[in-house]
Image (cartoon, rainbow, N blue to C red):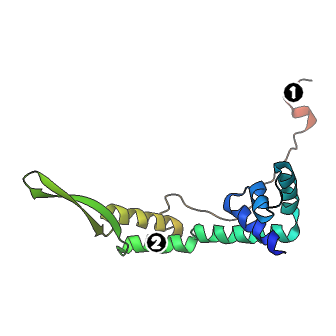
């Protein structure tokens, strides 16, 4: 991949505007319709497409929590190890009050919710019995011709 193609791909990743990205990477192109057509072709280039896909995957992986992160967070809340910042108003006398930021551990309701979510994940709190297995269902249609209730 050339340096200009890489520049195009990096610019494209900013806002997914191919025409704008092409104009930045190739500043000599002034007409929008020429830049639009060239940018469209550039997006079909295998090297450019692979590079963009790799970068998008990295961005996605960095921004989205995976299952392990979620489970670790819920466990921290359940154990009271996480901290949340909140604003409290404290009276100082003579109608004067002051806002302060404090850190607090999860309260009982938050810990209970974390326990519930973890319990659901591990199947601890099942109200319904989960039955797994396989069986064969066989439907037989062996009504003799004379015994039918059909009067045709």
- For discs 1 and 2, the disc positioned in front in the rendered view: 2
Residue 107, quarter of picture: bottom left
Residue at image coords 50%, 72%? 71
User: In the rendered image, which residue does mark 2 sit on?
Assistant: 73
Residue 148 sits in quarter? top right
* Residue bearing mark 1: 150
Nearer the N terminus, badge 1 or badge 2? 2
Q: Is residue 134 visible?
A: no
In the image, 40: left or right of 54? right
- Taking 146 as reference, is 114 above or below it? below
What's the distance in space between the residues labelled 1 and 2, CA to CA?
A: 66 Å
SS type, badge 2:
helix
| Residue placed most toward the observer, 123 or 72 | 72
Relative horizontal placement of residue 116, taking residue 60 as reference (left or right) = left
Residue drawn at point x = 53 percent, y = 73 percent:
69
Instruction: Say how many tags the image has.
Output: 2
Asked if residue 149 is positioned above or below residue 83 in the image, the reply reads: above
């Amino acid at each position: 991949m050339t340096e200009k193609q890489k520049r195009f791909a990096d610019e494209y990743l900013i806002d997914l505007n191919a025409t704008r990205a092409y104009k930045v990477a190739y500043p000599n192109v002034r007409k929008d319709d020429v830049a639009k057509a060239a940018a469209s072709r550039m997006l079909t280039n295998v090297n450019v497409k692979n590079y963009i896909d790799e970068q998008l995957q990295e961005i996605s992986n960095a921004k989205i929590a995976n299952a392990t992160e979620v489970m670790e967070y819920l466990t921290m809340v359940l154990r009271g190890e996480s901290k949340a910042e909140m604003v409290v108003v404290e009276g100082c006398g003579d109608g004067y009050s002051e806002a302060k930021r404090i850190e607090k551990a999860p309260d009982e309701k938050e810990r209970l919710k974390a326990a519930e979510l973890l319990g659901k994940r591990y199947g601890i709190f099942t109200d319904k019995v989960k039955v797994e297995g396989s069986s064969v269902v066989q439907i037989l249609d062996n009504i003799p011709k004379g015994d039918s209730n059909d009067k045709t």
